[in-house]
Amino acid sequence: MLTYSTLQDRPREFLAATSLTHEEFARVLPAFAAAYAVLYPPDKTWEGKVRQRQSGGGAKGGLPQMADKLFFILVYQKTNPLQTMHGLQFELSQPQTHYWIHRLLPVLQRALAALGMAPERDASRVATSALALEGAPDMAIDGTERRRQRPTNAAQQQEQYSGKKKTHTDKNILLVNEHTTKVVYLGPTVAGKKHDKKAADEGEIAYPTNATLDKDTGFQGYEPAGVLTQQPKKPKGQELSVADRFLNHLISSARVVVENVIAGVKRCRIVKDVLRLTKAGMSDLVMEIACGLHNLRVSCRHPFPTCDVLSLVSSG
């Protein structure tokens, strides 16, 4: 049986299974336990009814410890296995596995939000987001698509079909802080057919004061008020000047940041492979969690340096 203790002394295997180190896991665990207690109070049953007997009575569940619950859902988010296979690892039936997945994903999302790692979802609050205000307000925007199961409805099939990916997809707009490489804002999950610029326009993102924004040609014409935008120049049938080529090189170098961030988010295979969860809202939920886990890893492994101006003045 696979449990947290099974890999407690095997850091390489633990990292491969969860995408987190033991230290990062330990940072999430208290917030996860607190979120679980809020969502599922001990005086209530799983269905939300008042308990008729003391909590802990009756048959024991397959995930008795809070660390096992967090480990279970992290492994699922990271590896995206079939529920039957995931259940075999934890000695759970497929229905039990299905139940725990849908029970624990909202807990993990709430825990990451409590730690300040979840990306902003309200576009109007991006300007005051702590994630946006770390360092200078230099941002990069991009869209990313994720494969999904083919809808059964013919009209929905057409709506979800991405001509770019040649398959059915979901799409999200990501806004990235170029200094911290954290995901500042995650746009709503929309049909893969929707153009990047249209999705960004509908989001109506409020940017910080004096923000700069690196974008690609998918956002041609996207010019939010008060924001200095930068996009590589690609004139038709004309040669670029030396200055323009140099500028394109600088912009492309900056845009590598957002591409690497998306790759980091998709370290969780649940947002890289075809999503098998069909319940409404699940596609959006797992993407938010993947972004939050990316922000957590960056925060722990590459902490952004801060400067206390008052202490510098007093010491001078």
Image: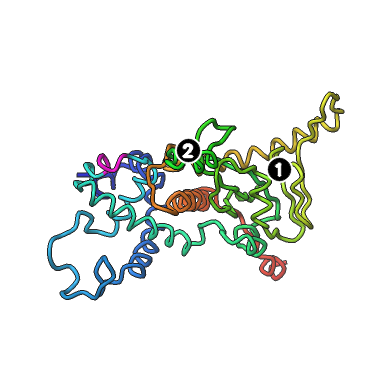
Q: Position of residue 314 (x, y in %)?
A: 70, 71
In the picture, measured across the screen, residue 87 lies left or right of residue 186, that is left
Instruction: Determine whether 150 is above or below 115 in the image.
Output: above
Which sits in the foreground, 316 or 237?
237
Q: Position of residue 12 (x, y in %)?
A: 36, 39
Q: Residue furthest left?
A: 58
Tell me, for residue 35, which label it has, or none.
none
Q: Are marks 2 and 1 in contact (CB under 8 Å)?
A: no
* Mark 2 element type: strand
For mark 2, what is the residue? 147
Which residue is located at x 44 percent, y 38 percent? 150
Q: What amino acid does circle 1 point to? A: Phe
Instruction: Determine whether 49 is above or below 115 in the image.
Output: below
Q: Position of residue 185 (x, y in %)?
A: 59, 54
For mark 1, what is the residue? 219
Which residue is located at x 15 percent, y 74 percent? 53
Q: In terms of secondary structure, what is the magenta stretch mainly?
A: helix
| In the image, residue 85 lies in the stretch drawn in magenta | yes
In the picture, measured across the screen, residue 87 lies left or right of residue 24, that is left
* Mark 1 element type: helix
- Magenta residues? 82-86
Q: Earlier in the sequence, mark 2 or mark 1?
A: 2
In the picture, measured across the screen, residue 153 lies left or right of residue 261, that is left
Which residue is located at x 72 percent, y 68 percent? 313
In the figure, residue 165 lies in which quadrant? top right
Q: What amino acid does circle 2 point to? A: Arg
Which sits in the foreground, 221 or 9?
221
